[in-house]
Image: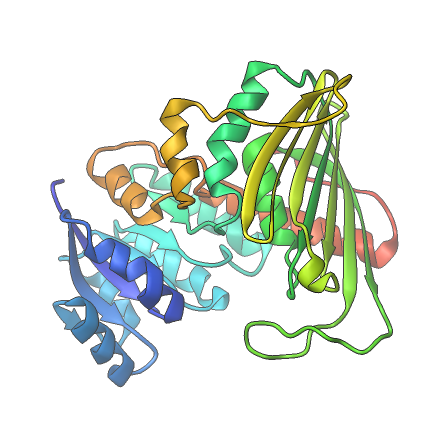
Amino acid sequence: MDKVRLGYIGAGNFSRNKILPNFQALENVDLVAVSNSSEESSQKVQEQFGFSRIEKNWSNILESNDIDAVVIGTRTDKHYEMSIPALKTGKHVLVLNAMTRTVTEAKEMLSVANENSHLVSLIYPGQFYVQEDAIFKRILDSGKIGKIQHIIDYWYTPFFGLGSQFEVINRIFGDQVRLFANRTSFQQESTNTDHHGRSVRPESNTVLAQRQDGSLVSYFHSTVAGSSQHSRIEVYGSEGVVVCGSFQDHSYIKIGGTKDENLEDVLIDTDLKPLWDNGDSILVEKNFIEAITSNQKPSSSIPLFSDGLKLLEFATAWKESNDNGVWVDLPNQ
């Protein structure tokens, strides 16, 4: 396939500001049809990005013979009912936001994707620690810090963000087998607002998870840190430590041995330096299209449907643990 004919369902602000410009810049993409929440908004997207037509009913995009791939950018509660028929009609699928709402729906979506394994089924990733991904993995593969013993993930956002934290940790370090969770709200006046201007409930979330080899993952998420926040990932091994984070718009990766008094900046390998210097995330859109046209394996930073299921299973286990104050086993993958 030389050119991918693309249909788009649900082109909101993120789609218009980031995703569609990236698709538009690819020479091997033909923007065929768009279906938004209203005919008026569909027409605006058509005019802005040059779609050949609009569709009043999103199901028409799934049934069209002149469309090869579909991007589903709607609310999460629509993903299940759109993704399955898309795959069954032979469309490649890229889903935005969370995969779907429930584990049951995710299992069915994954089952249909597996039945149509010749099709590409991806989830648009959160744009967190993407530029550090390959660097982190290379350090771990080198054995410089020895056997991993404890991973600590600190994250501070004005919204509940454990899902994004899990996506990063699972992507870089692999599966976890059980967890214990606690969510504590503080009785104080909120001083933070989210990107919609809404007041943020002051709270902290803590999850202790265990990996198959017995090593630990500690997730710390808070909405109360404010401008003093310092998000980072710390990896403690038998021979050393790696710390990766950002503070005041400055990103860093530092490494040191167990006997070193100070950590030093990681020397970025030549082939990874452009990604680090530019501070850019991977081009999800380019990866999606190349996976279709050339059977190239997408970047490991882009979740598969199987990864989306793991995230929902993590979220379900988190709720059970938090509600009942017990350790909860995660399903075997």
Quadrant location of the C terminus?
top right
Task: From this view, report whether residue 189 is shown above or below residue 32.
Answer: below
The answer to whether residue 325 is visible is yes
Name the residue at 50% across, 29% down: 135
Kindly indicate the quadrant of the structure image that contains residue 10.
Answer: bottom left
Q: Can residue 310 be seen from the camera position used here?
A: no
Q: Locate residue 196, reporting x and y percent.
A: 55, 77
Q: Residue at x 22, y 62 (%)?
A: 63
159 versus 152 height, above or below: below
Q: Nearer the viewer, residue 25 or 35?
A: 25
Residue in front for this viewpoint, 85 or 274: 274
What is the x, y in percent for residue 224? 75, 64
Query: At x 38% / y 64%, what residue is drawn?
Result: 73
Quadrant of the rendered structure where residue 199 is? bottom right
Q: Quadrant of residue 15?
A: bottom left
Q: Residue furthest bottom?
A: 40
Q: Which quadrant does the N terminus fall into?
A: top left
Where is residue 34? Give x, y as percent. 24, 69
**Residue 19 or residue 243, whichever sits in front:** 243
